[in-house]
Amino acid sequence: MRILILGGDGYLGWPTAMDLSAQGHEVAVADNYLRRRLCLEENIDLLFEVPDLDERTALWQLVSGHKIAVYIGNLCEWDFVAEVFKAFNPQAVVHYAEQPAAPYSMLNRKAATLTLNNNLSVTANVIFAAREFCPDAHIVKLGTMGEYGTPNIDIEEGWLEVEHKGRQHKFLYPRQAGSLYHTTKIMDTDLLWFYVRTWGLRVTDLMQGPVYGLFTDETENDERLLPYFNYDEIFGTVLNRFVVQAVAGHPLSVYGKGGQTRGYLNIKDTLNCVRLSVENPADRGELRIFNQFTETFSVNDLAEKVKEAGNQIGLKVEIQHVTNPRIEAEEHYYHPRHTGLLELGLKPHFLTKEVIVTMMGFVLKYKNEIKPNQIYQNVKWV
């Protein structure tokens, strides 16, 4: 298939592009380097330097023989979006092109406005471009399990059957976001659901949990192809942060009581979930929702796992509970379903001690590049 990846420079976008290209699909990526710009503005460094998309795609073609087309521009601007869709004529669109960080969205008014404008404008442009240029294309949008919040009932896979006063109806599962970023993802889902009903689009919405890891089948033997690796509080995911903190000798920063529980997945499983969704498209007029994670852990669980792995290789890892800068339940019920992707054939990669030790071994090579003052940014929800 011809697959267009929006946000193809990102932590997940670039590995997805290589994975689908390696499977024989014709792939194009579009990006405006927003993530890189925001890191520069907030004085945030990556663990290691990452080349731009022109360099990455040239290297990928050299090592794999597969070509990936590159479009650089702002997906909030309709003229650029129309140009890309007309030129590539995608059969599937993978939509990663959003400001991806909850802490950034809570930083200040400017960051909040950017998050709102970018995320909703891009989603709207994707919808209108699909209708105008490729109405049968399948849109795969990366959502987040954070849309659901932490309700005191089981979290179903996107939909809830409700019986009320003797009548029944199926609704989108009630959602209660914990940040402005997560709120924009709810709005994405609502926009897509409206246009699925109105224009008969075909959409898969992937409610993804926090992702960890670096290595995929395409990068395990060539570190030059690795994605971003943030270890700061704003853009770094929790397990990735903990691994870097352990290597740097910085106490693992557990917010509050540490009972916050979420669904997590290895970066390899993200790629497999997206590929399975793309290769098994939703029907016309269907909003298909999958909960995309493989295991649930509390923050305390993750900290203990990192401490155990670090101690195994001689690191002296400490855990420190700090005042929680977020507004969230620190002890709660959490039982989400996640059967849809397993039924499509997902074979999960679970979080083992060996996985964490391998990550630590890689990070140790860059230990001198770690800047401890960047780990804890003190972004407060209030």
Image: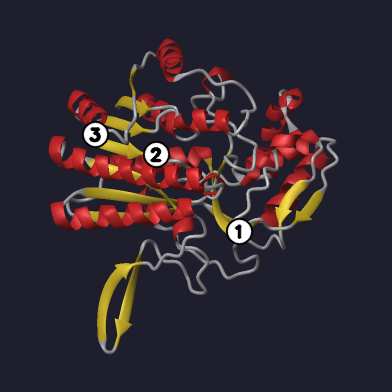
**Of all residues shown, which one is farthest toward the top?**
62
| Kind of element beneath mark 2 | loop
342 shown above or below 240: below
In the displayed structure image, the side of residue 117 where residue 177 appears, left or right: right
User: What label sits on residue 114 in the rendered view?
Assistant: none
Q: Three-letter amino acid code at disc 3?
A: Trp
Residue 357 seen by the camera: no
Tell me the residue that label 2 is attached to.
96
Tell me the residue that label 3 is attached to.
78
Q: Three-letter amino acid code at disc 2?
A: Tyr
Residue 331 position by quadrant: bottom right
Category of crowding for the residue at label 2, using alpha-carbon neighbours closer than 10 angstroms: few (below 14), some (14–19), many (at least 20): many
Q: CA distance from mark 1 to mark 2?
A: 28 Å
In the displayed structure image, the side of residue 89 where residue 231 appears, left or right: right
Category of crowding for the residue at label 3, using alpha-carbon neighbours closer than 10 angstroms: few (below 14), some (14–19), many (at least 20): some
Point 36% across, 30% down: residue: 20
User: What label sits on residue 382 in the rendered view?
Assistant: 1
The one nearer the camera, 356 or 90, is 90
Mark 3 or mark 2: whose residue is earlier in sequence: 3
Point 47% across, 45% down: residue: 347
Q: Position of residue 221 (x, y in %)?
A: 56, 20
Category of crowding for the residue at label 1, using alpha-carbon neighbours closer than 10 angstroms: few (below 14), some (14–19), many (at least 20): few
| Discs 1/3, front | 1
Residue 60 seen by the camera: yes
Q: Three-letter amino acid code at disc 1?
A: Val
- Where is the N terminus found, in terms of image quarters? top left
* Cβ–Cβ under 8 Å for marks 1 and 3: no
Mark 1 or mark 2: whose residue is earlier in sequence: 2
| Kind of element beneath mark 1 | loop
Q: Position of residue 157 (x, y in %)?
A: 39, 62
In the displayed structure image, the side of residue 87 where residue 354 appears, left or right: right
